[in-house]
Image (spheres, rainbow, N blue to C red):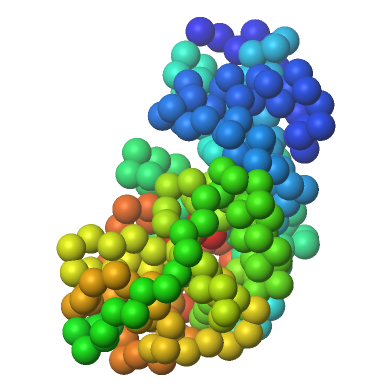
């Protein structure tokens, strides 16, 4: 189907008809992704900026970005993370996504230290056309067989307004979970994930641990704290039964347990464009900060 006419719209969160076109577009173009609940919870902040081609009221293609303050080896960098890249099936192979990518790169090139994104396996050949290179990421693990459970955490529900406000207040005052390769400001992305993970609150420590348990394995996705913490000390409080292993989905440079690289993370390959000093080193950008 030819794209007979198209208009570029961007940064249109507060323009209702374009926003509604976006909500109609994403499930069709992005494998059922529904952004409306995320918007309703306040996730669409000024950091999330979509660029879209629209034909009358039908959105044809989209490329979104998230502006981020990154930490790379402890140094602050200005980052742009691409997300929500897609085209309606009937409008594909017309260069629409390519045109949007080129416009975004041109708009932010002078003010950005690093462009990056997490791709799916169907488009691995697409991003190198714009100067992106693939970089391997690593999942880390630690032995925890000597930990005696002393569970005392309270599970928070992000759908509850009071709990969501508590989470947001802690997130906005948090220290970075990693300084190897991470970000300081990803509440809007985290909010997209939180309904799908367990959020454990240690009230006296004012710490959130976002994690899941699978058998005797604890998967830790993020730790939100206002000040430095000892993971060794808080670990017993967030497990209800003995565990053998902890997997970390961020670089555990602040974890006070002996950690080792476990395996490559291949589910959503990382692509970067710009100076990136970590190539060839084991690291993981926080999973709950990636789009």
For residue 205, what is the image quadrant?
bottom right
Kindly tell me whether residue 89 is visible in this rendering.
yes
Along the line of sight, the residue nearer the viewer: 291 or 38: 38
Q: In this view, does 14 lie above or below 203?
A: above
For residue 5, what is the image quadrant?
top right
For residue 163, what is the image quadrant?
bottom right
The answer to whether 245 appears left or right of 289 in the picture is: left
The answer to whether 129 appears left or right of 12 in the picture is: left
Residue at the location (66% across, 60% down)? 166
Q: In this view, does 45 lie above or below 109?
A: above
Q: In this view, does 184 lie above or below 121?
A: below
| Image coords of residue 173 (percent x, y) | 71, 72
Along the line of sight, the residue nearer the viewer: 202 or 80: 202
| Image coords of residue 251 (percent x, y) | 43, 77
Along the line of sight, the residue nearer the viewer: 16 or 239: 239
Residue at the location (39% across, 64% down)? 211
Residue at the location (23% across, 72% down)? 241
Kindly tell me whether residue 132 is visible in this rendering.
no
| Image coords of residue 191 (percent x, y) | 58, 50
Residue at the location (38% across, 88% down)? 232
The answer to whether 214 appears left or right of 281 in the picture is: left
| Image coords of residue 43 (percent x, y) | 66, 45
């Amino acid at each position: 189907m030819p794209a007979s006419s198209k208009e570029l719209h961007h940064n249109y969160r507060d323009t209702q008809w374009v926003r509604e076109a976006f909500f109609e577009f994403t499930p069709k173009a992005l494998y059922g992704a529904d952004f409306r609940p995320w918007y309703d919870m306040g996730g669409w902040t000024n950091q999330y900026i979509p660029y879209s081609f629209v034909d009358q009221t039908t959105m044809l293609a989209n490329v979104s970005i998230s502006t981020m303050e990154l930490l790379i080896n402890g140094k602050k960098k200005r980052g742009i993370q691409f997300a929500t890249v897609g085209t309606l099936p009937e409008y594909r192979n017309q260069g629409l996504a390519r045109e949007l990518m080129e416009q975004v790169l041109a708009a932010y090139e002078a003010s950005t230290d690093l462009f990056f994104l997490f791709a799916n396996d169907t488009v691995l050949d697409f991003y190198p056309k714009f100067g992106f290179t693939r970089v391997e990421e690593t999942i880390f693990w630690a032995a925890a067989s000597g930990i005696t459970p002393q569970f005392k955490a309270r599970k928070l529900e992000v759908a509850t307004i009071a709990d969501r406000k508590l989470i947001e207040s802690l997130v906005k005052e948090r220290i970075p979970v990693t300084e190897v390769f991470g970000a300081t400001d990803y509440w809007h992305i985290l909010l997209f994930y939180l309904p799908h993970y367990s959020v454990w609150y240690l009230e006296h420590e004012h710490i959130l641990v976002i994690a899941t348990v699978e058998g005797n394995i604890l998967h830790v996705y993020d730790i939100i704290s206002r000040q430095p913490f000892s993971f060794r000390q808080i670990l017993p409080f967030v497990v209800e039964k003995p565990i053998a292993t902890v997997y970390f989905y961020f670089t555990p440079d602040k974890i006070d347990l002996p950690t080792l690289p476990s395996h490559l993370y291949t589910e959503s390959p990382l692509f970067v464009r710009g100076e990136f000093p970590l190539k060839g080193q084991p690291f993981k950008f926080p999973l709950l900060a990636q789009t």
